[in-house]
Image (cartoon, rainbow, N blue to C red):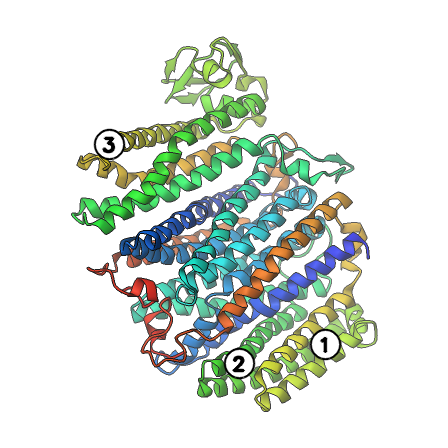
Amino acid sequence: MSLAEIMLAALWLGLSAYVLFGGADFGGGVWDLLAGGTHRGRDQRDLVMHSIGPIWEANHVWLIFVIVLMWTGIPSVFAAITSTLYIPLTLAALGIIARGAGFAFRKASTDLWQQRLFGAAFAFSSVVTPFFLGTAAGAIASGRVPPGIAAGDVMSAWLNPTSAVSGALAVGIAAYLAAVYLTHDARRGRRQDLAEAFRARALAAGMMVGLLATAGLLVLRGDAPGLFTELTTGRALPLLVLSVAAGLVSLVLLWRRTYLAARASAALTVLGLLWGWGLGQYPWLLPGVTLDQAAATRPVLAATLGALAVGALITLPSLWYLYATFQRPTPSADQDRPHTTGDDTPASGRRRE
Amino acid sequence: MVQAGVVVADLAAARMQMALSLGWHIVIACFGVGMPAIVLFAEWRGHRTGDAHFRLLARRWARAMGVLFAVGAVSGTILSFEMGLLWPGLMGTYGEVIGLPFSLEGIAFFIEAIFLGIYLYAWDRLPPVPHMLSAVPIVMAGVASAFFVVTANAWMQQPTGFDVAGGRVVAVDPWAAMFNPATPPQTAHMILAAFMVAGFGMASVYAVAMLRGRRDRYHRLGFLLPFTVAAVITPVQVGVGDWAARFVADNQPVKLAAMEGVYESARGVPLHLGGVATGGEMRYALEIPNGLSLLAHGDPQAEVMGLNEVPARDRPPVNVVHWAFQIMVGIGVALLALSAWFGLAWRRRRDFPRSRWFLRAASLSGVASVLALEAGWVVTEVGRQPWIVYGVLRVSEAVNPAPGLAYGFILVAAVYAVLTAGTVYVLRLMARRPVPIAPQESDVTGEPVV
């Protein structure tokens, strides 16, 4: 593997982590939006807040990682993408602001009207943001971002069939991952009712994602025939098969209430799609631009990859520690106490962990 | 030399959008850099002395820090988008040259976000010592990320570590780019500024409370701790600021000329206080003879380059840069005087000055330090104009030529107006929550402090 290939693999790993972790945090917001009225939806919203509270900021950093690695590793491609797609990407960035601020503000506020207002900002932007990021992915996959600065059409690049389907697919994937993850969180919190509720949502979202992915393939056939051929008959086919198989397995596991294993197979479903796209398009990053043409100079790749390798030695164990800390039951969970964690909103104090 | 197709209004909008989002983020980021150390110190004192006031302060500050960190994270994210959305001409060519410090900053940001999650949410899950240890990486990573980001900005002032051939960069040395000549003075100046903004900003909240009669131990400690940090750093910052200014004098003479409104190159140049640059000269300014030559080069007869040495199209807007510099230095001197007043009173009788005027001034110190921060940033960035990479690439050559950037700016400005209102509202909401009369078990066990 050349340095450029290693860099691209690291970029795609970062993107995978962002979709699997950050994507699920957006999905939590999707379920928050769909949880129903203030009273009826309270328990679900509390579970979502509780699950993503400590980890969403760390998960969000994967996006920064992807952006920075793009401009470092393939600068001209980064400039082509951001300049042509500045409308959906600006909207996604504003959605990220509304999501993070809404979440933090809701947690800090006490009155119901404040919680509803900030909660609405959080929930709505959790749908909007992955949608626009998905349309950008669709624009790249369907070859609508040509090389050069703002060389593409700033409207039709992201207003097209592939972008529409991939935007919807991004929201669906986020919702699906979140629902699958939340089933296990709910069970660990001994809330069988919530586990059942999210199991039903996970099954529905899983089938939805399957339908959207199928629709996406059909759209690609007309819109991006090259990628379609690679996915259906070329070297990306095994990954597509893996994705479909893992998706079906995850539905069975959800049906049988094997929630922890369902997490793994749901993640595999999404990884299959993501890496299938990547492999199907490789080595073309943009129309007429290969990785070797776009890659940064060797000293830059060497220094950056070296720094990232050292960084991974510090970051990955820390991430593991973060997840482990909050996937463990709290010391107080076994006792009959009226309140649980002090850092939650008064609303969630009502619920036992 | 605007690219074909770039509307002048779009270029102005892109600059305004970058200024707005960066000028907003820089304030929040200062709290992200400076606050964790102060909060950790309060928690440590609380455990060490058994004084529950310290733990209560740490707990409440940590909550505010949680909100500030969240808005800081998202307002920083849009900046990384905007680097490409607004300035593809910069990133498409030079992205790889400044990629290394941003990659390192990404790692630091990971560490910050991970341990902040642990520190804020595991207050009741971890015993005191591991809990305090979880804040140490936040402190270190906050300072480190400020360092890395500012090295990239320093590179825009003093671009090194690359050559250009045929429109592409060649012979890139990312370490040389990162450790460019402007890196030491700029990073030191910025990190100290962050601690000043956090210290004065936190202290001013309690100064206001004390002016309103709440002079109990809780409020006194809440004032003393952050104010002491800021007061100790302020004289150091004045020295570092002098170093940074001398650096500009040696390496960006056009910027210095704009800062001081010097048009004609000469020896023994006076220092201009106030004044307006109009018609190619500095008018109505109070002149201190030989002041600039002495301050900038340490010699009253030293030669200072004037703006007339470069064509008008290579000059930054003089009044903006000159006045921003005056404001920064003026506030810096005022904060130095306030710190000295505090230091003298503390030496005499282990207490802050009794005068209400001291508290009044201290309650303004937070806003003043933010103003100085913004003014200093204007000097650095507007003083660099018309270059985005000093002497190498113009801002107008780097901007995204896609149509309609002006509409994007209006939308972004509207979102920031709401974000500002929300942040201020929520922070005031948190500050107004009553403090328990007697320290409760809650601040150690993790019950909500209401």
Location of the C terminus of chain B (image quadrant): bottom left
Give A124 or B43, whichever is nearer the viewer: B43
Q: Chain of mark 3?
A: B
Q: Which of the two marks, 3 or 1, is nearer to us in this view?
A: 3
Circle 3 residue: B345
Q: Residue at x 46, y 46 (%)?
A: B33
CA distance for labels 2 and 1: 31 Å
Give B39 or A305, whichever is nearer the viewer: B39
Left or right of A61, for residue B343: left
Q: Which of the two marks, 3 or 2, is nearer to us in this view?
A: 3
Dot 3 and dot 2 residues touching (CB under 8 Å): no
Q: B185 above or below A255?
A: above
Query: Can you see residue A159?
Result: no
Q: A330 above or below B375?
A: below
**x and y percent of residue A13 in the render?**
68, 63
Label 3 element class:
helix
Circle 2 residue: A184
Give B231 or B202, whichever is nearer the viewer: B231
Kind of residue at badge 2: His
Kind of residue at badge 3: Ala
Circle 1 residue: A217
- The residue carrying pointer 3 sits among few (fewer than 14), some (14 to 19) or many (20 or more) residues within 10 Å by Cα, namely some
Location of the N terminus of chain B (image quadrant): top right
Q: Are marks 3 and 2 on the same chain?
A: no
Question: Going by the picture, which residue comes out furthest to the bottom?
Answer: A256
Give A15 or B107, whichever is nearer the viewer: B107
Q: Are marks 2 and 1 on the same chain?
A: yes
Q: Chain of mark 2?
A: A
Kind of residue at badge 1: Leu
Q: Residue at x 44, y 72 (%)?
A: A50
